[in-house]
């Protein structure tokens, strides 16, 4: 059995590292979108609290 050629080893290494790079970028994208979603939910909740307090005051 002959050892793998240099081009086969290089193409495997580039494919493997490219796959890892794409996976890392996708993970960073998901992390960023999750963080933005949590921040948006917190801001909406903070903005809604005075509105709900106003509704409770009017209902009395």
Image (tube, rainbow, N blue to C red):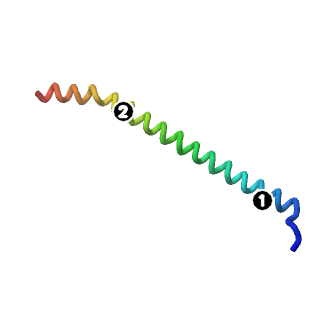
Q: Residue sitting at 83 percent across and 62 percent down?
A: 8
Query: Does dot 1 land on a helix, a strand or a loop?
Result: helix
Q: Residue furthest left?
A: 60
Q: Position of residue 45 (x, y in %)?
A: 34, 33
Taking depth in this image into account, of 34 and 6 the one nearest to the observer is: 6
Q: Is residue 8 left or right of residue 48?
A: right
Q: Quadrant of the C terminus?
A: top left
Q: Residue sitting at 27 percent across and 25 percent down?
A: 50
How packed mark 1 is, by other alpha carbons closer than 10 Å (few <14, some 14-19, many 20 or more), is: few
How packed mark 2 is, by other alpha carbons closer than 10 Å (few <14, some 14-19, many 20 or more), is: few
Q: Circle 2 is placed at which residue position?
A: 44
Q: Residue sitting at 88 percent across and 71 percent down?
A: 2
Q: Circle 1 is placed at which residue position?
A: 12
Looking at the rendered image, the disc whose residue lies closer to the viewer, 1 or 2, is: 1
Q: Which mark is residue 1?
A: none
Instruction: Name above or below for residue 20 compared with residue 36.
Output: below
Q: Quadrant of the N terminus?
A: bottom right
Q: Position of residue 21 (x, y in %)?
A: 68, 48
């Amino acid at each position: 059995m002959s050892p793998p050629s240099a081009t086969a080893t290089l193409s495997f290494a580039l494919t493997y590292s490219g796959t890892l790079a794409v996976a890392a970028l996708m993970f960073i994208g998901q992390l960023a979108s999750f963080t933005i979603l949590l921040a948006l939910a917190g801001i909406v909740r903070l903005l809604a609290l005075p509105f709900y307090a106003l509704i409770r005051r009017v209902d009395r």
